[in-house]
Image (cartoon, helix red, strand yellow):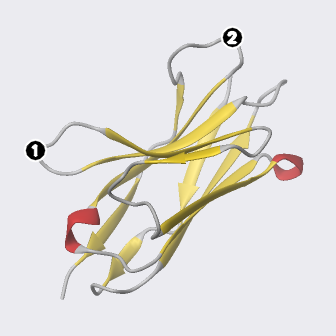
Amino acid sequence: QVHLVESGGGSVQPGGSLRLSCAATGTNFRLNTMAWHRQAPGKERELVASVTIGGTSNYADSVKGRFTISRDNAKNSMYLQMNNLEPEDTAVYYCSGKSAFSITYDSWGQGTQVTVSS
C-alpha cells in the first residue's frame, strides 16, 4: 500500500511562485511514474505534469515553461516548482503515482490547495 502526502500549497499573488512536495511511504517498490493532477471548482481533474523514474517529464500545455516537475528517487519524493502563477492555476493539487504494471494512476494523496489571487 502506497501512501502519498502533499505539502507546500498556499495563497500567492499572480506572478508569484510556490513549490509543492510529495512524499511517498509504505511502498515496497518504486512508483514508475509520478504525477501532479489538479482540480478547480466546477472542473474535471486534469493532469498537470508527470515524471518517470528515469526522469522523463511531460507537461500540460497550460503550464509549459512555468512549472517544473522533478523527483528524488532515493527519498521517494516528487516536487512541482510553479513560477509565474496565474489565477487559472487555482485548484487543489494532487500527487499521484502508478507502478510499471498499472495503466492508470492508482495511488493518490489527499490534495493541497493552491490559490492565486490579487
Figure quadrant of the N terminus: top right
Q: Which residue is mark 2?
A: 101
List x then y, in percent, for residue 49: 50, 48
Quadrant location of residue 37? Answer: top left
> Secondary structure under badge 2?
loop
Q: Nearer the viewer, residue 12 or 67?
A: 67
Quadrant location of residue 100? Answer: top right
Q: Nearer the viewer, residue 27 or 81?
A: 81
Q: Residue at x 21, y 51 (%)?
A: 40
Q: Residue at x 15, y 50 (%)?
A: 41
Camera-near label (2 vs 1) is: 2
- Taking the image as shown, residue 56 lies to the left or right of residue 73, namely left
Q: Residue at x 28, y 38 (%)?
A: 45
List x then y, in percent, for residue 95: 52, 44
Give the answer, above or below, for where 39 lies relative to 99: below
At label 1, counting other C-alpha atoms closer than 10 Å, the crowd grade (few under 14, some 14-19, many 20 or more) is few
Say what amino acid the circle numbered 2 marks. Phe
Tag of residue 72: none
At label 2, counting other C-alpha atoms closer than 10 Å, the crowd grade (few under 14, some 14-19, many 20 or more) is few
Figure quadrant of the C terminus: bottom left
Say what amino acid the circle numbered 1 marks. Gly
Tag of residue 42: 1
Give the answer, above or below, for where 17 lies relative to 54: below
Quadrant location of residue 81? Answer: bottom right
Label 2 and label 1: CA atoms lie apart by 32 Å
Q: Residue at x 72, y 30 (%)?
A: 31
> Secondary structure under badge 1?
loop
Identify the mark nearer the N-term, 2 or 1.
1
